[in-house]
Amino acid sequence: MHKILLAATIIIISFYLINSHNTPDIVGTWYSEETGEKIIFNENGSVELENVNYIPKYEIITPTKMIYTINNQVFEMNFRIEDNQLYWGISEPEIFSKKKGE
């Protein structure tokens, strides 16, 4: 019985480690596939955008939703990460890649 429990525990831990390793975090630099614009999500919740004088903020509230605050306006945004692509938007997501032009 202990061997079965140990084997099940190892399988669950391995599955978690493989999935967490293959699923990129939102933190980092992303490039819009539509416009080429660069966006950087920082660990501290700030967002860096090209050619802007303000600093937007984000807060992850569920695994697929974030609160995005820009110029004192608050938006609930949907997002998901699949195959090193970020799908991010209010209703129709824009697609971002980790590498420019990918």
Image (tube, rainbow, N blue to C red):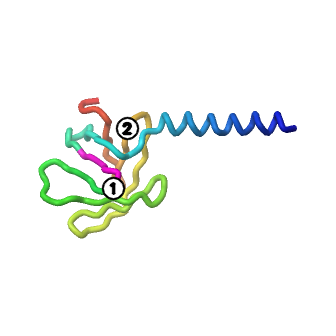
Q: Which one is in front in this view, the residue at disc 2 or the one at disc 1? A: 1
Residue 4 versus residue 85: which sits nearer the camera?
4
| 5 sits to left or right of 61 | right
Residue 88 versus residue 22: which sits nearer the camera?
22
- What residue is pinned by disc 1? 44
| 8 sits to left or right of 18 | right
In the picture, the quarter occupied by the C terminus is top left
Question: What's the distance in space between the residues labelled 2 and 1, CA to CA?
Answer: 21 Å
**Residue 8 locus on image (x, y percent):** 74, 37
Q: Which mark is residue 85?
A: 2
Disc 2, SS? strand
**Residue 73 locus on image (x, y percent):** 26, 68
Residue for point 38% across, 46% down: 26
Give the amino acid type for the residue marked by disc 1 in the picture: Asn
**Residue 79 locus on image (x, y percent):** 40, 50
Is residue 2 one of those drawn in magenta?
Answer: no
Residue span colored magenta: 39-44
Farthest residue to the right: give it: 1
Residue for point 25% across, 59% down: 56
